[in-house]
Amino acid sequence: MTQRIIEITSPAFVNKEQLHGLKDLSSLFPQEQPLALEIGCGTGHFVTEMAARHPGTNFLAIDIYNKGCLKTCKKIELLALTNIRVLRIEACYLIANYVERESLSAIYINCPDPWPKKRHRNRRLVNLSFVQSILHYLKPKGDFYFSTDVPDYAEQVAELIPIADGYRNALSTPFVTHIPDYPISKYMRRFLDLGQPIHFIQLQRCQGLDLNSLPEPELTSGFRSNFGDRHHA
């Protein structure tokens, strides 16, 4: 069944048409300051808390669900936050076409669709190609955060750490079940209340990395353009 698209008129929402001819994404915000990206913002709990805590950072929140974008915009307006912009767009398409190289201070992906069946795991967003590609878009010492409630997804991404050249592990172990001051979304809280841990990975782009030594990014839009992602925030 086709989902009814609700028009979003919030000033925090950016239509795809507004991206055409845009000099850079920083111009979407009233102040030029470090830019972070959340892929799969759900209904906005995580990104609004981050933006409130870090007013000196601009946050671009994207999701492929119209209703999630609408709810995120309502939270932004309720909290009177000016450092978040929301787009309904697929992640790899946005990055490959509109994100400038070495422009992001951080990328956050919280509890994406795990595609739990073994035959579907090649549809998972975070794989070696994706992790290596986003190195081109992170600033030196920029952070990549990944969290999941699915243990084998955490293990799969953790296995990339030794082979994804250009990162250092910012944690003491491949993944942890707690990062101090990391906002816990409504979706995460649901699993924590059931006694099921959330697994966190934090990688940091090496400061002296020579991007010319790396393969060019290969960012291909995900299966069904990531319309399999779950509402999670």
Image: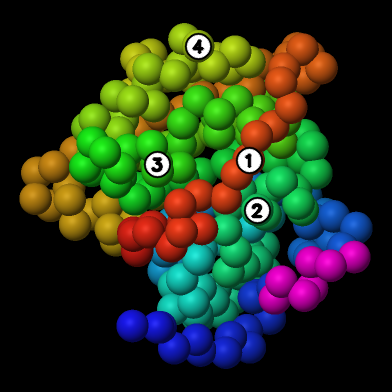
Q: Amino acid at mark 3?
A: Arg
Q: Is residue 107 magenta?
A: no
Q: Are marks 3 and 2 in contact (CB under 8 Å)?
A: no
Mark 4–mark 2 distance (CA, rounded to whole Å): 25 Å
Q: Which residue is mark 1?
A: 219
Q: In terms of sequence position, does the residue under pointer 1 or pointer 4 come before the other? A: 4
The residue positioned farthest toward the front in the image shown: 119
Identify the secondary structure beneath mark 2. helix
Question: Residue at coordinates 28% horizontally, 58% vertically from top-left?
Answer: 187
Identify the secondary structure beneath mark 3. loop
Q: Amino acid at mark 4?
A: Ile
Q: Is residue 16 magenta?
A: yes
Residue 93: mark? 2
Q: Which residue is mark 4?
A: 163
Q: In terms of sequence position, does the residue under pointer 3 or pointer 2 come before the other? A: 2
Query: Hey, which quadrant is residue 149 in on the image?
Result: top left
Q: Are marks 1 and 4 in contact (CB under 8 Å)?
A: no
Mark 3–mark 2 distance (CA, rounded to whole Å): 16 Å
For the record, the magenta segment spans: 15-21
Question: Neighbour class for label 1 at 10 Å: few (<14), some, many (≥20)?
Answer: some
Q: Are marks 2 and 1 in contact (CB under 8 Å)?
A: yes
Instruction: Locate residue 196, reporting x and y percent.
Output: 13, 42
Question: Residue at coordinates 19% horizontally, 57% vertically from top-left?
Answer: 190
Q: Is residue 212 above or below residue 88?
A: above
Q: In terms of sequence position, does the residue under pointer 3 or pointer 1 come before the other? A: 3
Q: Which residue is mark 3?
A: 124
Q: In terms of sequence position, does the residue under pointer 4 or pointer 2 come before the other? A: 2
Mark 3–mark 1 distance (CA, rounded to whole Å): 13 Å
Instruction: Locate residue 123, reporting x and y percent.
Output: 40, 43
Question: Residue at coordinates 69% horizontally, 32% vertically from top-left?
Answer: 217
Quadrant where the image shows the N terminus:
bottom left
Q: Amino acid at mark 2?
A: Tyr
